Amino acid sequence: MTLIKSISGIRGTIGGKEGEALTPYDVMKYAAAFGQWAIENSEEKKIVIGRDARPSGELITNIASGVLQGMGIDVVDLGLSTTPTVEMAVPAEKAAGGIIITASHNPNGWNALKLLNKKGEFISSDDGARVLEIADEGKIEFALSKDLGKRIQNDTYIDYHVDKIVELDLVDVDAIKEKNFKIAVDAVNSSGAIALPKLLDKLGVTDYEIFFDEPNGLFPHNPEPLPENITHICGEVEKGRFDLGIVVDPDVDRLAFVGNNGEPFGEEYTLVTVADFVLKNKSGNTVSNMSSTRALKDVTLKNGGDYNASAVGEVNVVNKMKATHAVIGGEGNGGIIYPELHYGRDALVGVALFLSHLAKFGKPSALLRAMYPNYHISKNKIELTPDIDVDKVLEGVKEKYQKHPINTEDGVKIDFESEWVHLRKSNTEPIIRIYAESDSQNTADAVANKIMMDIKDIVVDKVEAD
């Protein structure tokens, strides 16, 4: 069983022993700590909660809500919702913060408490550290009977979210309507099955089919929207009835597309494509994290903007976007952040901007994908065991490749002449991620495999030395 306590939230497998997994006790403990942090940092005693469709979500919502009410905090419960919807609801409600109950791309045996500040953005590293400190101290103060908080059900915020999207200047509803797109959607039996039909209806798309449309949290495949996991919708689009396939993850903050030929765009090219559209209509800069494709930099420079890379993690991307006045940014995992709407990864605004782009492009979606630089990323991971000292592994790799340009802002990123490789410890799983990029898949795989062999050698050498 696994429990990962990080500055951005608490994530773990459901069931098991307290402190070793995401048990009801752990939900209570960390929800109370977050409530205490909210009281320390805001005069508003209100927190917004929303969840994806995982079977454990309702239980966790009830526990977290009850604890917060017991602390005198009102809870606005959005029920089944999306991560970006909760992010938008927090400032709309003038709340002290928000809790999103979702483990994002993890299987449905996982869940998490993802924590937001009063702006509806992920809490900072300092605030996250304070929440963990409060949880460890355990000195939570609860309210008297007369001061208990209320629980307010509000299921209108997805509609609010969609309305704000269609009001954006770059979202061209008339152009989308005129094209009469035929669209297939993989909603992975979660909140996208609720949100995407509302969005497509408002955008004037009348011919669409939602696959896996039952929001019961029983994911029909691995819910991470990678090419190897979305073969069903690729097959449906390849049959020729659809102009485009759309895939979202369980909490609808990651987005992937399938061209009319049934071929995935690749999750890296979600941001690249949408950013190109934004930059063609609005001058400015872009940001993505270090593990994202260099194609975004190419597109940004071509459109006259500046590109900057951040450490991995949405909060780091957002901070860099604010510092560089980026007009769009995100992550190569299919996460789009469009600050004109809000500072959070949002698949729904990504769909609206993409369809506006495709409508104005006027050609099949597969040809749109072919317009962009064709890089290939090899994404790999090594499971962590107690005998692996990650810091020593990273130091060993850094020493081995010291003659090459190295960035250590987030793990170790090595730039070769035509390739790069980035390795870092995951914030959400007990693994080391190894990403490599080149202009051919074989070369990217070879670079990643070489680094993984280096890591294994370093681990063996350390064990033998001990």
Image (cartoon, grey):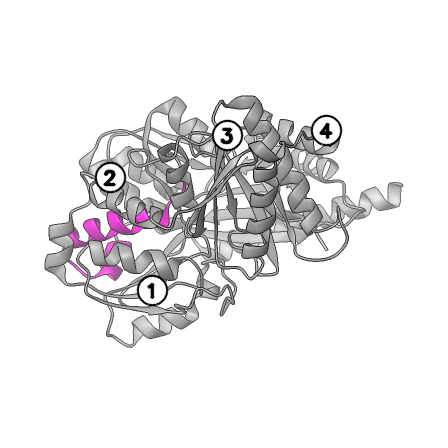
Q: What span is in magenta? A: 344-369
Q: Is residue 383 left or right of residue 351?
A: right
Mark-to-mark CA distance, 2 and 1: 23 Å
Q: Position of residue 300 (x, y in %)?
A: 30, 35
First in residue order: circle 3 vs circle 2: 3
First in residue order: circle 3 vs circle 4: 3
Q: Residues within 10 Å of mark 3 (few under 14, many from 20)?
A: many
Q: Amino acid at mark 1?
A: Val
Q: From this viewpoint, is residue 69 visible?
A: yes
First in residue order: circle 4 vs circle 1: 4
Q: Amino acid at mark 3?
A: Lys
Q: Amino acid at mark 4?
A: Lys
Mark-to-mark CA distance, 3 and 4: 18 Å
Helix, strand or loop status at disc 2:
helix
Q: Position of residue 293 (x, y in %)?
A: 42, 44
Mark-to-mark CA distance, 4 and 1: 47 Å
Residue placed furthest toward the right: 466
The residue that disc 1 covers is 185
Q: Nearer the viewer, mark 1 or mark 3?
A: 3
Compared to residue 282, the image places residue 375 above or below, namely below
Residue 247 falls inside the magenta stretch:
no
Q: Nearer the viewer, mark 4 or mark 1?
A: 4
Q: Is residue 190 left or right of residue 11?
A: left
The residue that disc 3 covers is 45
Count of numbered circles on the image: 4
The residue that disc 4 covers is 139
Q: Residues within 10 Å of mark 2 (few under 14, many from 20)?
A: some
Q: Quadrant of residue 1?
A: bottom right
Residue 278 is tagged as 2
Compared to residue 264, the image places residue 96 above or below, namely above
Q: Residues within 10 Å of mark 4 (few under 14, many from 20)?
A: few
Q: Nearer the viewer, residue 442 or 51?
A: 51
